[in-house]
Image (cartoon, rainbow, N blue to C red):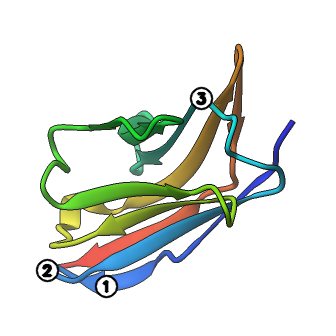
Amino acid sequence: QVQLVESGGGLVQAGGSLTLSCAASANIFSIDVMGWYRQAPGKQRELVATITRGGRRNYADSVKGRFTISRDNAKNTLNLQINTLEPEDTAVYYCNAQIFSNNYWGQGTQVTVSS
């Protein structure tokens, strides 16, 4: 079992940048897949990006070229660098860890982009 705590959200202007971080309560080295998801008001939660234990990355088409996911196994953190923010990126961003057949979620961090 692992607990996840996100941080780094906030209010930014369109075109700005943010770095989201997710601190895990356990060693993440052995976690096969970690990722970021987001949920905008009135919409379903959607995949933003994932990264495997081996470093393979996968991005939603809408964020390719603007978002970069990374994991720091030494610090047990998952990060999401967000550049060139758009109003459509406004959402609650959630950290996820997939351990065997279980999914673990953080409480989310709000990102609001003003136009």
The residue under label 2 is 15
Residue that mark 3 sits on: 32
Could you say where residue 93 lies in the image, as x and y percent from the top left? Answer: 49, 56
Res 73 seen here: yes
> Farthest top residue?
101
Mark 1–mark 2 CB contact (< 8 Å):
no
Q: Is residue 81 above or below residue 14?
A: above
Name the front one of labels 3 and 1.
Answer: 3
Q: How many marks?
A: 3
Q: CA distance from mark 1 to mark 2?
A: 8 Å
Of residues 114 and 73, the one drawn nearer to the viewer in this rendering = 73
Which residue is found at the position 63% from the left and 55% from the top?
A: 73
The mark that comes first in sequence, 2 or 3, is 2
Residue at x 28% of width, y 75% of height: 113
Secondary structure at badge 1 equals strand
Residue under numbered circle 1: 12
Instruction: Say left or right for 111 vs 65.
Output: right
Instruction: Specify the farthest residue to the right.
Output: 1
Distance of label 2 from label 3 (alpha carbons): 33 Å
Q: Give above or below for 37 relative to 82.
A: above
Q: Amino acid at mark 2?
A: Gly
Callout 1, which amino acid? Answer: Val
